[in-house]
Amino acid sequence: MNSQNGGLDDLVRAWQYRLRRLIPGGHLRAPVVIAVFALVGVGAWTAYYAVPSDSVAVVQRFGKYLTEVPPGLHFKLPLGIDVATIVPVKRQLKQEFGFATPGATDAYQIPRDAKEETQMVTGDLNAALVEWVVQYRISDPAKFLFEVREPRLILRDVSESVMREVVGDRTVDEVITIGRQEIEAEALTKMQALATKYALGTSIDQVQLKNINPPEPVQASFNEVNQAQQEKEKLINEARRDYNKVIPLAEGEKDQRIREADGYRLKRINEAQGDAARFNALLTEYIKAPVVTRRRIYIETLQDVMPSVRSKIIVDERTRSILPFLNLDSAKGDRP
């Protein structure tokens, strides 16, 4: 800062020296000194400028485009010889249609006539009130400043024209419900194409639909229709929920019963086949040795039957000295 002031002092002394040589007697008058100091101050004040980090400066010399300078502190020729215009190339700008954000400072952001901009006719000759937002950036500062007059205003006209075209190709149901994303994508493509064609120097980042409503005279009826459709969807969803709850349960029980029947069938078949194979094996052995086989079957049968008999009386048939008497009543009474 001191070096800058020193340079200004040197410049003032140089001018004073020149003026003393030009003015007879070598004496400066007070108005002349004041004018010199004012001229020097204005020149110093207009010789430098600062560019924000999200912008670039477009420099003109005598009104002719000279160059673009990046962010930072820069110097130029003073006294209006060079003019630097700050252009926010990294800042995302937006334009609103049909509504306005409170506190907006950009005059081209807010709608000129919100009611007129939103009134559109759909492809099935119905009316709709469409509100949307266009977000864009300045991609080419030179084109933005010098190619066309009022590029922001032209961008508003382009956006409104494209949106009316896209909405006019669809039915009112598509515009209000299922076609919003398609409308946004198609409008973005067409707006960018026109912005490039008209050399606006802008790059459109996003087109976003906001509120879409029917005209005011039919809004009440339209709301009733929407409520009826929502109630219909609600009932359908509840019916599907009950269906998904009951039908899979019944299907599961059916499959379980079928599997149980298949299991019982296989069990009976396997048991029958096993009994048949056992009988055939016994028959084969019986044919080979009838006495031994008969004896073994008899013993195996007793092994199966005797454990279930509680009271057992065994009499050897070769015994001759006992009385062959069996008190069945006492035997019956001894049973628990």
Image (cartoon, rainbow, N blue to C red):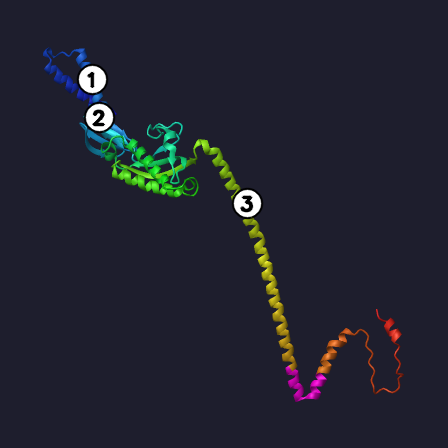
Q: What residue type is labelled 3?
A: Leu
Q: Residue 132: say if magenta.
A: no
Picture residue at 19% right of the left edge, 32% below the top: 66
Q: Which amino acid does label 2 sit on?
A: Ala
Identify the element where label 2 is drawn: loop
Mark pair 3, 1: CA separation = 85 Å
As drawn, 263 above or below 37: below
Identify the element where label 1 is drawn: helix
> Which residue does the numbered mark 1 point to in the structure image?
37
Q: Is residue 304 left or right of residue 318?
A: left
> Which residue does the numbered mark 3 point to in the structure image?
235
Residue 255 locus on image (x, y percent)? 58, 61
Residue 334 locus on image (x, y percent)? 86, 71
Mark pair 2, 3: CA separation = 74 Å
Q: What residue type is labelled 1?
A: Phe
Q: Nearer the viewer, residue 119 or 100?
A: 119
Mark pair 1, 2: CA separation = 15 Å
Nearest-to-viewer mark from 3 and 1: 3
Nearest-to-viewer mark from 1 and 2: 2
Residue 24 locus on image (x, y percent)? 10, 11
Q: Which of 68 and 241 is in front in this view?
A: 241
Quadrant of the rendering where the N terminus is positioned: top left
Q: Are marks 1 and 2 in contact (CB under 8 Å)?
A: no
Q: In this view, does 20 lie to the left or right of 110?
A: left
Q: Reading the chain from its start, which is encountered first: label 1 or label 2?
A: 1
Q: Reading the chain from its start, which is encountered first: label 3 or label 1?
A: 1
Nearest-to-viewer mark from 2 and 3: 3
Q: Do the residues labelled 2 and 3 touch (CB within 8 Å)?
A: no
Crowdedness of circle 3 by 10 Å Cα count: few (<14), some, many (20+)? few
> Which residue does the numbered mark 2 point to in the structure image?
47
Q: Do the residues labelled 3 and 1 touch (CB within 8 Å)?
A: no
Q: Which region is colored magenta?
A: 280-296
